[in-house]
Image (tube, rainbow, N blue to C red):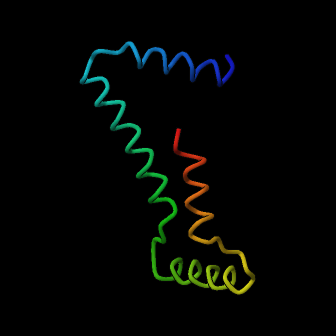
Amino acid sequence: MDLAVKKVELIEWLIQLKDENMLNRIESLKQGSIESYYNSRMPKNELELKKKLDQSEKDIEQGRTYSQQEVEARFLTKFAK
């Protein structure tokens, strides 16, 4: 089954779902996924933090940055639907 079809079927099922407990469980799953992603990007120790800081400084020096307006535009494009 195509991924897009799976998504549509899931959306249709969610629209019809009336079980609040099930919706809460799904919401928890979603939140856990977000937290997992966030935690995977956080440095685990001082050495990892230093590496991330060093990389950030190199990015800034080499002009790999975004303005506040560019960041806001990207978020609006990606998340405002």
Q: Is residue 57 left or right of residue 22?
A: right
Tell me if residue 4 comes above or below residue 70 in the rendering: above
Which sits in the foreground, 50 or 60?
Answer: 60
- Disc tally is 0
Q: Quadrant of residue 27?
A: top left
At 38% across and 37% down in the image, what residue appears? 29
Residue 17 is left or right of residue 7, and the answer is: left
Decide: is 11 above or below 25.
Answer: above
Q: Give the camera-side residue of 37 and 8.
A: 8
Q: Is residue 55 above or below residue 41?
A: below
Residue at figure coordinates x 59%, y 20% from the top left: 6
Residue 32 % position (x, y): 38, 45
**Up-down: is 21 above or below 62?**
above
Q: Position of residue 81 (x, y in %)?
A: 53, 38
* Position of residue 57 measured from the top left corner of the image (x, y, whole percent): 63, 85
From the viewer's side, name the closer residue of 49 and 7.
Answer: 7
Quarter location, residue 52: bottom right
Outermost residue to the left: 21
Residue 16 shown left or right of residue 12 in the figure: left
> Residue at (52%, 43%) from the top-left corner?
80
Residue visible at 67% across and 16% down?
1
